[in-house]
Amino acid sequence: MKKIIIISLLLISTQVYSQTLSSKNKKAIEYFNKALNSYNAYKYDKAVYWSEAALKKDDKFIEVYYLLSDIYGELKQPIRKILNLKKAIVLKPEKSTLAYYTLIKTELSIGKYEDAKRHSITLAKYDKTNKYTSQIKLFKKIINFGIKAMQNPVDFKPINLGKNINSEYNEYLPAISADEQTLIFTRLIETGKRYYDGSKEMQEDFFISKNNNNNFTLAKAIGEPLNSNGNEGAQSLSADGRTLFFTSCEYERGKSYHGKSYGSCDIFVSHKIGKNWSQPKNLGATVNSKYWESQPSFSADGKTLYFASDRPGGKGKIDIWKTQLNEDNTWNKPINLGDSINTKEQDQSPFIHYDNKTLYFASNGHIGMGKTDLFMAKIDSSQKITEVKNLGYPINTWDEEVGLCINASGENAYFASSKKSEFGGLDLYTFKLPEKIKPNKVTYVKGFVYDAENIDKLEAKIKLINLSSNKEVAQSMSDKETGEFLVCLPEGNDYAFNVSKKGYLFYSETFSLSRTSDSLKTYHFDIPLSPIRKGRKTILKNIFFNTNSYELQNKSYVELEKLLQFIQSNKNIKIEISGHTDNTGNENHNKQLSLNRAKSVYDYLIEKGISASRLSYKGYGSSMPIDKNNTEKGKQKNRRTEFKII
């Protein structure tokens, strides 16, 4: 029934098959009806045979050319579809506006922009009722964009990820950790069963590969509890590679293969603890609904999730939304990204880069090459979209381009394509991202957290805070079994890095990335946390003073607040705040300067309500170095503020 409607839309009369035909030849009409019946029975070979038989009897039989155009459309043979539309148009050009419209759409689908441009002009000429005015305007925009994009191609040299990743089956939807050490993707595999018509039953499962000396290892099925008897896909891997958001769909009312379902497709989450993945959990009714929720993308800030949905309240058929994680691990009500991103059509496949400022997505609503193109958008500090840019040709073509992911540095992109498949179906590829469409540079700090006394690995809370704005940039937890962590560090700011756990002194570090550079180094820290005991001390690495000054710089308040919270949370402790200098200059001066600096911290805590009976301060000058004073780096380490449990 659907195909008959499609055919009738291509014809001048919506009831042409049941009423007047352009041919009077009875045999031609008989063969045409046989062709039509074969087409509606999905017997395309027979439909072509009887259509050609009809044309032998009457080569001016317009409806047969329309039928053949539909047949070749179903057979994915656009050139033959175009040929038959042109033959029909030649017979009655002035009455073929709908045929011209279909011809232009087909030409755009294979990148014949110049042909489409010429036929758009002809369509406008014959469109006496202005029925196609809006469509012609849209065609003009697509044609102009496509021609210009092809005249100005971007550098694009995709490299197949090879036999360890790709197979005879379809591989798609790659997700990669920030350090590119973990790759998870979806593969469509055989279940071993067959459908009633004899065709093989296929199923989507997750596969995982590790990076070994810049080569991905042989991908293996990720196994239970992530893989099930149903389909899993559209996944997003957290920056540290230890949290996976993915989509699982309803197989019967209220149920998916991973538990409760709220509707069509829902988003689930699983956490990797040690070597094992936790039982997936539905994100709940705040995020998921009775509608379609899919294609999650988890931000490196550790609390923002982007996803696609056709739920009510959007701008179009499919929109991109975002939700944020609360302190109690519940999700906020999703917010629509608005009409800067979302259109009346389908906007989907979001990927938020590790810089938290660059969003890549797919859309057939923004002007592109013709179908679904890949775009990027910048998000400013107030969360407003400042620009949307097409990624350009030949990353985008007249075919469907749906999704990609990008590593932390912004150098390497990963995507799926069947255009030059070396192994069969969809393969996974990587390519160097052109400069104009790169995100902001991001590096990362990784390592593990452990008990300073017994070397046991610890699960600790990790926070990254912008020292200029005093805003939290990222939050994470180290693995409770391995102590491992990874936190992204976007270029362009200075950060306070804090690691804390109940019963332990906190650890702090500072990262100065406010000055841009051509390349960013990565950091590795194995972090010892000391149990709260008498005599234990911690360096406050984010307390800052100007040279020869004891006035606290504004960016010190991030660390001071952390120290304040620590003292408030541990009501039975007393601490000594100590100041230290390098050996430059007069020792008496250094001792007084270090004393005044320690007192500045002391005064801040007193002002915030900490009892003086719990605090003391002391200046040690250069008498207690922790490094040599014969290098600037060593001197910098020796200039420090500490606190000690007394």
Image: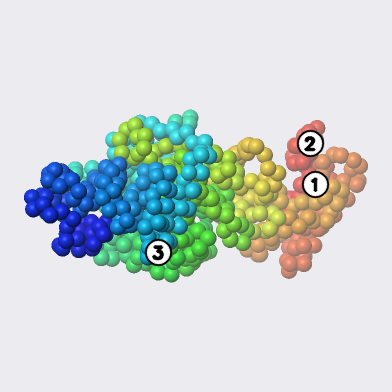
What residue is shown at x 78% (from left), y 33% (from top)? 631
What is the three-letter code of the residue carrying label 3?
Asn
Secondary structure of the residue carrying tag 3 is loop
Please name which of the two marks, 3 or 2, marks the residue nearer to the observer. 3
Tell me which numbered mark, 1 or 3, is placed earlier along the sequence.
3
What residue is shown at x 76% (from left), y 37% (from top)? 634
Secondary structure of the residue carrying tag 2 is helix
What is the three-letter code of the residue carrying label 2?
Glu
- Position of the C terminus by quadrant: bottom right
Q: Which mark is residue 632?
A: 2
Query: Residue 256, how many percent across, how many down?
Result: 29, 59
User: Counting other residues with Cα less than 10 Å from the Cα at mark 1, is it few (<14), some (14-19), or many (20 or more)?
Assistant: many
Q: Which residue is mark 3?
A: 130
Q: Is residue 595 left or right of residue 539?
A: right
- Position of the N terminus by quadrant: bottom left
Who is closer to the viewer here, 453 or 49? Answer: 49
Query: Residue 95, how many percent across, how many down?
Result: 30, 57
Tell me which numbered mark, 1 or 2, is placed earlier along the sequence.
1
Q: Is residue 145 left or right of residue 311?
A: right
How far is disc 3 from disc 2 in space, using C-alphas?
A: 76 Å
Who is closer to the viewer here, 631 or 53? Answer: 53
Q: Is residue 594 left or right of residue 537?
A: right
